[in-house]
């Protein structure tokens, strides 16, 4: 089993739709979690950290379920500018200390 | 303006040549990382450094070398031993604390001539 797995995608949704991405992680000791977005041929940019209580930033909501070892990202009222690849990132806090594990990404295309 | 600067943006390597990619950060971060990304693929860790004068191999270190002589600088050398160097190279840095995210530079695209 891979350390971090994501919905394979791609997701093609119309403008204004609500879309949800899921991510599962294998290391139950993982301590911190993040969602990044990566535009085509650009660097990943932090979208939001994911906290145990769940957190919201405008149209974006992140949830963490430690018992089931999954993280979700919900995007409401999708915009054309939301089109990107969304990366789930986990800090496993193993012997390597500060290394992160990146998921393969889920590609989103928001269509007019 | 604080951030991570990678240079050059585009780089071409001839057969048998070593090339060095620059990464500088003024965020006062202890940890720095190098990743490689191939088209349509995820990020793979090449090397990382948690402190000056110390660095560790990542998952795909063969054919690469790094140094960390200063806190703000973490250059990556792609050696001639790396037979398939064409990729997008990303440098990142991170502050201490398990809940601190990584921040990325805007990358260097390396191609073979």
Image (spheres, grey):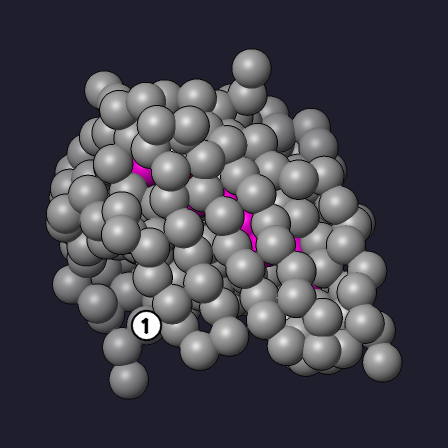
Q: Residue at x 48, y 24 (%)?
A: A3
Q: Which residue is mark 1?
A: B3
Whether the magenta-drawn stretch holds residue A85 is answered as yes
Q: Quadrant of residue A85?
A: bottom right
The N terminus of chain B appears in which quarter of the rendering?
bottom left
**Which residue is more in the foreground, A37 or B44?**
A37
Question: What stretch of residues is rendered in magenta?
Answer: A84-91
Protein chain holding label 1: B
Q: Position of residue B87 (x, y in %)?
A: 67, 46
User: Is there any visible trace of residue A63 in the rendered image?
Assistant: yes
Q: Residue at x 27, y 52 (%)?
A: A53
Whether the magenta-drawn stretch holds residue A11 is answered as no
Q: Main secondary structure of the magenta part?
A: strand
**Which residue is more in the foreground, A29 or B42?**
A29
Q: Farthest residue in the right direction?
A: A112
Horizontal arrangement in the rendering, residue A109 relative to residue B78 (left or right): right
**Which residue is more in the foreground, B103 or A55?**
A55
Q: Position of residue A96 (x, y in %)?
A: 26, 25
Q: Is residue A18 above or below residue B75?
A: below
Q: Position of residue A31 (x, y in %)?
A: 25, 36
Q: Residue at x 32, y 22 (%)?
A: A28
Element at label 1: loop
Q: Is residue A12 above or below residue B36?
A: below
Q: Position of residue B101 (x, y in %)?
A: 31, 54
């Amino acid at each position: 089993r891979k350390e971090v797995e994501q919905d394979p995608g791609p997701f093609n949704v119309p403008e204004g739709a609500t879309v949800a991405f899921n991510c599962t992680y294998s290391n139950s000791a993982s301590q911190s979690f993040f969602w990044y977005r990566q535009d085509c041929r650009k660097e990943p940019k932090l979208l939001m950290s994911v906290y145990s209580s769940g957190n919201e930033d405008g149209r974006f909501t992140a949830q963490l379920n430690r018992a089931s070892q999954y993280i979700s990202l919900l995007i409401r009222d999708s915009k054309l500018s939301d089109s990107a690849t969304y990366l789930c990132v986990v800090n496993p806090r193993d012997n390597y200390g500060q290394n992160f594990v990146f998921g393969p990404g889920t590609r989103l295309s928001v269509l007019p | 303006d604080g951030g991570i600067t990678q240079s050059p943006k585009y780089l071409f390597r001839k057969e048998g040549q070593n090339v060095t990619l620059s990464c500088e950060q003024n965020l006062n971060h202890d940890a720095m990382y190098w990743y490689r990304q191939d088209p349509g693929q995820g990020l793979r860790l090449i090397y990382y450094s948690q402190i000056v004068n110390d660095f560790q191999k990542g998952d795909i270190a063969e054919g690469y070398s790094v140094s960390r002589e200063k806190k703000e600088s973490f250059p990556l050398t792609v050696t001639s031993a790396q037979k398939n160097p064409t990729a997008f190279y990303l440098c990142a840095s991170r502050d201490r604390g398990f809940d601190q995210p990584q921040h990325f530079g805007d990358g260097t695209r390396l191609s073979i001539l």
